[in-house]
Structures are given as C-alpha cells and as structure tokens.
Image: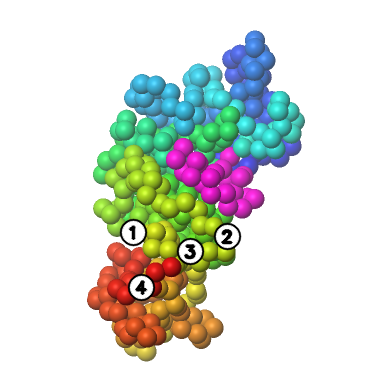
Amino acid sequence: MNQPPGEESLKTNVPEVPDFDLLRPIGEGGFGRVWMARNRTTGRLRAVKLIAKSRVGTADPAGREMASITRLEATLRHHHPNLVTIHHVGQTDDHLFYVMDLADDAGGTEPIDPERYEPATLRRRLDDGPLDPQSCVACARQLLEGLASLHHAGMVHRDVKPANCLFIAGQLRLADFGLLTRPGVNVSRIGTEKYMPPDGRMDARADVYAAGLVIYEMLTGYSADRFPQLGDRSAAVLADPALGVLMGLTLDACSPDPQTRYADAGAMLRELDRRLARSPCPVKPGRRPWIAPLVLAVVVLAGIGVWRRPWIQRTDAPSTPIERVSVNFITYPFDATILVDGRTLIGEDGIPLKTPCTADDLPDGRHRVAFRFDGRGELPKGEIDFSVTRQIVARWDAVESP
C-alpha cells in the first residue's frame, strides 16, 4: 500500500462502518484505503480496508475484491500464519469493507499510540537499508511459506511486493488479496509493473519472479529495478553463505525463461531449505572466502561486482535494436579475464573486467565465451545464449588447496 493521505483528509469524509470507529487512514492503494479502527465494544485496534462500490459506467474494484476474498475464504481451509488474517467482511451502502489484524508499529511503540502509529511493512524496513543475514533468511522463508499456501490452494497473488508484506507480532505476513485469482492463459496482466515477469503470464511462476525480486531487495537494500546488481553489497554476500544462497535463489527465480523458474513458491521454499542445509558456516573474519572449496558453491550462485557498459561496441550497427542483459561471470580461482566472441570485456575505467563480476549491458543472443588466467592459459566455455543463461561458471582443474 502507498502512504496515507495528509492531515486534511483525516478531518473530513470519514466513512461509517458497523461496530468500528475509523480513526485515520494508514495506507492507500489504487483500489482502496486502509484505516486504523477501534472496535466500539472491545476497544481493540484493527485495520479496516474500504473499497468504494462502483457507480454506473465505472469499473468495479469492490466487486473484484469481493470475488478475491470470497475465493480466498472458500479455498483456504485454515488461516496461515504468514498470511494476513481477515476477521470479517461486510458492506455498507457505499463501501465493501473487511477487518484485519493491525500491523506492528514501525517505531516499535507498545502499546500502539494511534496518533503516531505507522504500519510496519517490509517496504518501510528496507528504507533503512538491507536486512541482516538472519532476518533475510527468516523473512524470505516466511514470505515463501505464505505464498506457497496460496499456490497449493490453486491461487495466484499477482501483487507480491515489499509494501504488501506486513509484520504482525514480528512475523512477516503477505497481505492485500485484491488481485487474487486462479491461474490461466486469460489472466490479465495487472499488479505492480516492476515486479511483473517479462513474459507477461500471470501465474504461480510470476509470483515466484516477484518473490525473487523482493528477496533481492532484502539482501541488497536496492530497488528491484537494479536486479541482479550487487554493487557495494558484493563483499557482504561473499562473506556470508546464507546471503550467497539467497542471491542464487533470486537468480533462478527471476530467470527470463519462465520454464526455468521454480514452478511455484513451494518448490522455491524447498530449494531454499536444501541449499541452506548444504551451505557452510559463515566465513570467519579475515578469511579469504574464495579459497575454501565449500564456499565456492555460494560464490557461484552470487554474481559479484557490478560494472557499467563493459561491451566493446559493434561497428556494424544492427538494423533492429539489440536487447541488453546483465550476466554474472565467476571462475575458480578468481581474477580471470573474460573473453566474449574473442574480445576482452572492458570496464568503464578502461581496465579489463576480472572475475567474479556482473557485466551489465551485454547484447543478448548467442556468444562464444572463454576465460584467460595468467599461468593457466585459456579456458573456453563454448557458445552460450545470454538470453537464457545469466551466470557462467568455470574452474581450472588444478586448484591449490587452502
């Protein structure tokens, strides 16, 4: 949800809903407004979402929301701890409304002060930067648990993003079910554009794509627009196996080819647990993480370093525009030069790129890739399609032991 409106709107046009006093708006989206409300009988604070009913000749967001909530209530047999619980659904002459748990206070105030309250969302948390590794893993698992329950019930969310992840009693819960539907070829492309997959099909794999971007934001603190760049977070990802596992998971979840993504959030969650179980303990301070073979598995999954426009531009301008992509290059040992189509990749500073790095702005399509390392010669990887493969890994056989 977006930020609530200013103080002026708090004083006028307060809707009426049965059994609740609406105190003030605390969130707003394209189809409704969320209010902090107090139950007139118990005095308990809740969140109440109101969606205006349609008028003649206009769209019907309330009807769509009602259909989504009805589908949710009819399909889920039990409330899931990582989905926001809807306690009551009702209607007035002007609005559809439903009552939910109130999110924690972003400021940590307990008990909640209605005048100063700000809902604790993942979006607000990320405004302060990336999450620590333990929180990253916990929040990623909680997000996938909630999303997996929807997918298991045969539904897709269609609007997975940090603003729709609330913290309630310290646990992440997926919220905002207004776009919930059943997957199918005719499902409309609707939601938040930057979290939608490029193929346009809004199914469970689209939710997986969005979840991958949300996890990327957790571990980097960057906007989803920057995926898969790591920038100044590369050292942190290198130093912590859990972050490396999460970065690898996002690379797979956000594959441009939908068939190579996880089939649903349940499959993504199982793979997360499998990789975490196989990952080594966090690297001790001062240790060179690329030396230990066990840590190699983590490094392979995380394209490290970001470079702008490394490609040597073609002299024969193509008649049609070329798609540009980011590709991760990793070798073992590190510090190998990268050759694409026989040419060395050069950074903006004019210095050849060395592995590991993420090379941005490469033309997609098929290219010959090789690596060169002093004293070891050239290691060809063959022809690789950058449209499909976004991370390329190579290692020389003779590797010194740590």
Residue at the spot of label 1: 256
- Mark 2: few, some, or many residues within 10 Å (few <14, many ≥20)? few
Q: Is residue 125 left or right of residue 302?
A: right
Q: Judge whether residue 366 is colored magenta.
A: no
Q: Judge whether residue 140 is colored magenta.
A: yes
Q: Position of residue 207 (x, y in %)?
A: 38, 44
The kind of residue on which mark 2 rests is Pro
Q: Is residue 229 above or below residue 335?
A: above
Q: Position of residue 158 (x, y in %)?
A: 40, 42
Which mark lies nearer to you, 1 or 3? 3
Q: Earlier in the sequence, mark 2 or mark 1?
A: 1
What residue lies at 35% left-to-right and 73% top-to-bottom? 399
Q: Position of residue 378 (x, y in %)?
A: 31, 83
| SS label for mark 2 | loop
Structural distance between the alpha carbons of marks 1 and 3: 30 Å
The kind of residue on which mark 3 rests is Pro
Residue at the spot of label 3: 289
Look at the image and give the residue range highlighted in magenta: 121-142
